Image: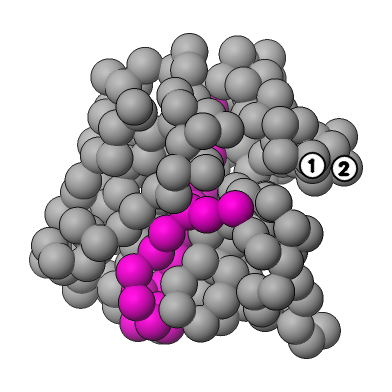
Amino acid sequence: MTDMLEQIAVDAAVRELRPDFAVLVLTAEGLANGPSDERSTGWLTAAGSGAALQDPHVDAWRAAYKAFGARPQRFRPSVDALLKRAADLPPINLVVDAYNAVSVEYALPVGGEDLDTYQGAARLIRATGTEPFDVASGVEHPEEGEVVWRDDLGVTCRRWNWRQCLRTRITESTKNALFLLERLEPYSLERLDAAGDALAARLRAISPDVRIESRLIEPI
């Protein structure tokens, strides 16, 4: 997984838009995922009960969305959307519950991807508008200039961290996963690191034999 981690990239056009952007990338090999249980729903409940609904990091993400032409009231950054329903977060599966709870607890966008569905490395770009994006109803395309995560097959997440494609979502059968913990100023790198540690601890609670590696892609 080390080689794959090193290939993950943030395009210069995204850096120009937000030079303060940083992402902590985690890979987890050998997950034993499964249906939500009392422990994982407890993580969601605890995160929701302590959620800070007004966090400057959410404001930073709203500003970033406006900068590439997305209306944050209509297309909410993922952490904004989760915090809006923090009191009643739906359980999905063990691994998704773990990273959603960390996202709410740390007021941080956290994405989870099934690595075995990937072709090539993840990279954050500004879209041309021609890239395919798989959804339940078929194939969509991002808007030109939209910030998206993609691999060799197409867009894996639209509007930075707004919506994940169907192909790469984490399911109960996922064995190997990629996690993207995304930060803008004024969020500290120390808090980002703590969020990564919290996620790693929960993944190990789910899967004691999981192998976790990480890489911080720093701001410029």
Residue 115, magenta (yes or no): yes
Mark 2 touches mark 1? (CB < 8 Å): yes
Three-letter amino acid code at the position of disc 1: Ala
Q: Is residue 158 left or right of residue 194?
A: right
**Residue placed at 77% from the left, 59% from the top?**
143
Residue 167, magenta (yes or no): no
Percent position of residue 179, x then y: 37, 55
Percent position of residue 15, x then y: 46, 36
How many residues crowd around disc 1 within 10 Å: few (fewer than 14), some, or many (20 or more)? Answer: some
Secondary structure of the residue carrying tag 2 is loop
**Residue placed at 48% from the left, 13% from the top?**
186
Q: Nearer the viewer, residue 207 or 7?
A: 7
Q: Nearer the viewer, residue 153 or 104?
A: 153
Q: Is residue 24 left or right of residue 141?
A: left
Model colouring: one colour
From the image, tell me which residue sits under label 1: 70
Percent position of residue 100, x then y: 52, 47
Q: Nearer the viewer, residue 87 or 63?
A: 63
Please tell me the numbered disc located at residue 11.
Answer: none
